[in-house]
Image (tube, rainbow, N blue to C red):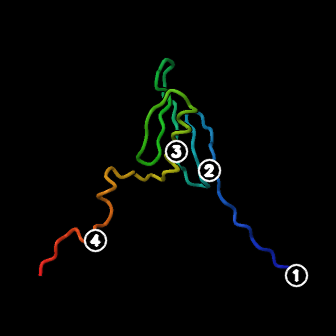
Amino acid sequence: MATTKKRRLRLKPFWERGYKSHGYWLGKKRLGQIEVEPGKHLEMKYRWRVDNHGGQTTTLREARSLVEQAALMGGRQLSLFPEFDAPASDATPRRS
């Protein structure tokens, strides 16, 4: 009997349409969400949310791209001062 190797499937994120919202999923984990604001004549119609990030946009296409970008970042916040984040090797004086 020949042994078969199991191929590991790589999950790909996908969009799921709902009645008043759209969800961005990776397997069974929801990465992001877009909700439609109630009202006909709103300028900012779509509200998007990924972890602690969110905002409002005028078009669904723009909201989807912002959700995808925020999901790729993984909820990480970029450093404001990268030169201070590096560990200083001899920055602290030693007492003898």
- Cα gap from disc 1 to disc 4, whole angstroms: 60 Å
Q: Residues within 10 Å of mark 1 (few under 14, many from 20)?
A: few
Q: Which numbered mark, 4 or 2, is in the foreground of this view?
A: 4
Which residue is depicted at the point 65% across and 57% down? 11
Determine which of the numbered discs, if any, sits on residue 89 in the image: 4
Secondary structure under badge 4?
A: loop
Label located before the other in sequence (4 or 3) = 3
Mark nearer the N terminus (4 vs 2): 2
Spatial separation of the CA atoms under disc 3 and disc 2: 12 Å
Q: Are marks 1 and 4 in contact (CB under 8 Å)?
A: no
State the image coordinates of residue 58 (x, y, percent, origin top left).
50, 26
Residue 35's disc is none
Q: Amino acid at mark 3?
A: Gln
**Distance between the Cα atoms at labels 4 and 3?**
35 Å
Residue 82 position, x and y percent, is 34, 55
Read off the residue under disc 1. Answer: 1
Gap in angstroms between the C-alphas marked 1 and 3? 47 Å
Quadrant that contains the C terminus: bottom left
Identify the mark at residue 69; answer none if there is no mark.
Answer: 3
Question: How far apart are the two marked residues, 4 and 2, measured between alpha carbons?
Answer: 41 Å
- The foreground one among 78 and 43 is 78
Farthest residue, direction front:
90
Q: Amino acid at mark 1?
A: Met
Question: Do callouts 3 and 2 mark residues in contact (Cβ within 8 Å)?
Answer: no
Foreground mark, 1 or 3, reads 3
Q: Locate the N terminus by quadrant.
A: bottom right
Callout in the foreground (4, 3)? 4
User: Label 2, on which residue?
Assistant: 13
